[in-house]
Image (cartoon, helix red, strand yellow):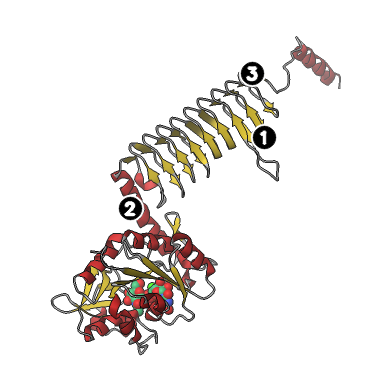
Amino acid sequence: MPSQRKALAVVLAAGEGTRMKSDRPKVLHQVAGRSMLAHVLAAVAVAGVESVAVVVGPGRNDVRDEALRLAPHARVFVQAERLGTAHAVLAAREAIADGCDDLLVLFADTPLVTGATILALRAALAEGAGVAALGFAAADPFGYGRLLQDDSGRLLAIREEKDASDAERAVRLCNAGLMAIDGGSALDWLGRIGAANAKGEFYLTDVIEIARDAGRTAQVVRAEETEVLGVNDRIQLAQAEAVAQNRLRRAAMAAGVTMVAPETVFLCADTAFGRDVLIEPHVVIGPGVSIADGAVIHAFSHLEGASVGAGATIGPYARLRPGARLAEKAKVGNFVEIKNANVATGAKVNHLTYIGDADIGANANIGAGTITCNYDGFFKYRTEIGENAFIGSNSALVAPVKIGAGAYVGSGSVVTKNVAADALVVARGRQMEKAGWAASFRAAQAAKKAAK
Ligand code: UD1
Ligand code: CA
């Protein structure tokens, strides 16, 4: 169905978001590691919508840039004045005039709507409806438009809270705000909407009665309240986050990831998992992480911008920062931080270590407390450690520096020069011992004290 029908999505992102109390525009606040706008654009893509228009507020180049980053072919329109949802849709008049079968209206502050729901709205148009509105049974309908239906469930009108009679306010089926409108009639219908209502705004919801007056039917597509949660403040942002996290956890588990305590694991919308990954409790995964088959992430680890190879083990209490790339069967243990570094197959970095801007060869062993000194306050430098090298505990590798394959670094070394393959380097104070020194020191000091 959608493959033959041409669709245009108009995403409304011109809200001021005052209640967020933020310097950042509301729709750029993040849920599961990506902006709310990005979530909506992703759902639009899933629903096979080929044309996208984003309506932004005046001077909102940041919102425009985010839209174009995610949907380079989108057209961005500015709604100069905030005069209501229909007025906002008409800001994209030029895009609508290009013609489409399905005109979809989405709100960028309603980030959890799925591609499947957008497809259901499109299906209603394909079946002949002139308009389809997304409805939900609200736990507390206050503030929402009510969906007024006839006895056979056909949609008659949407009444805004402020314009509703007491009887209409008693209706629990509410308007989520999202709609699909017959593309061929949309400009005509939207153009007829006036602002003679309690708020003096151009209400998109008036399109229902206008379509019916034109002899077309209006249909309700239902969604769960959690899916159509609109975000107006940071409390609702956290509610949306909770819903998104639950979805991501369930999807991961359904795809073969074991989570011992899923409610304590935090994921991002782009987290990629292989099969038979095990995630222990209290793991936080930020954007840009992939974890391959059979890897184990032990408790209390934090990963961001990292890739974890098959069969690798991480943590407990490990931190993988952006650019950490671990090959198969690599091991990263407790209190280890890895940033912008490649850890090759089977290499071990097991305890209390910082590895930054480095390449660690296959099967190398990095002892406890090793630090790559990668920064001089101005620039970053790389450390290269060859395969099978052994770095003794508590060593500082002052970059730029290379440790050859198979070389040994003695514990406690501060290595400032390159080390040849298979060499031993010891770069620490030489050990000396004076027989009996401590005993004679104690005797002399005790005598001094007694004489006072
Ligand atoms: C709207 C619906 C209401 C529905 C509710 C769901 C209308 C008239 N009412 O009401 O039936 O129950 O959503 O949350 O559509 N926007 C603009 N420019 C504008 C006005 C709005 O871009 O001039 C955007 C907002 O940023 C927001 C969306 O449109 O993303 C909805 O606007 P909002 O003012 O929140 O509508 P509600 O009054 O909540
Ligand atoms: Ca709203």
SS label for mark 2? helix
Identify residue for label 3. 423
Around disc 1, counting alpha carbons within 10 Å, would you say few (fewer than 14), some (14 to 19), or many (20 or more)? some
* Type of amino acid at the residue the image marks with label 1: Pro
Alpha carbons under labels 3 and 2: distance apart: 53 Å
- The residue at the far bottom in this view is 196
SS label for mark 1? loop
Identify residue for label 2. 247
* 226 relative to 394 in the view: left or right: left
Around disc 2, counting alpha carbons within 10 Å, would you say few (fewer than 14), some (14 to 19), or many (20 or more)? some
Sequence-first disc among 3 and 1: 1
Q: For the C terminus, give its image quadrant.
A: top right
Sequence-first disc among 1 and 2: 2
* 95 relative to 4 in the view: left or right: right
Residue 133, percent across and down? Answer: 27, 73
Around disc 3, counting alpha carbons within 10 Å, would you say few (fewer than 14), some (14 to 19), or many (20 or more)? some
Sequence-first disc among 3 and 2: 2
Instruction: Say whether marks 3 and 2 touch (CB < 8 Å).
Output: no
Residue 153, percent across and down? Answer: 16, 75
- Foreground residue among 73 and 415: 73
* Type of amino acid at the residue the image marks with label 2: Arg
Residue under the image location 43 percent in, 38 percent down: 299
- Mark in front: 1 vs 2: 1
Q: Is residue 301 visible?
A: no
Residue under the image location 50 percent in, 38 percent down: 325
Check the image and report above or below for 283 versus 165: above
Identify residue for label 1. 400
Check the image and report above or below for 65 versus 406: below
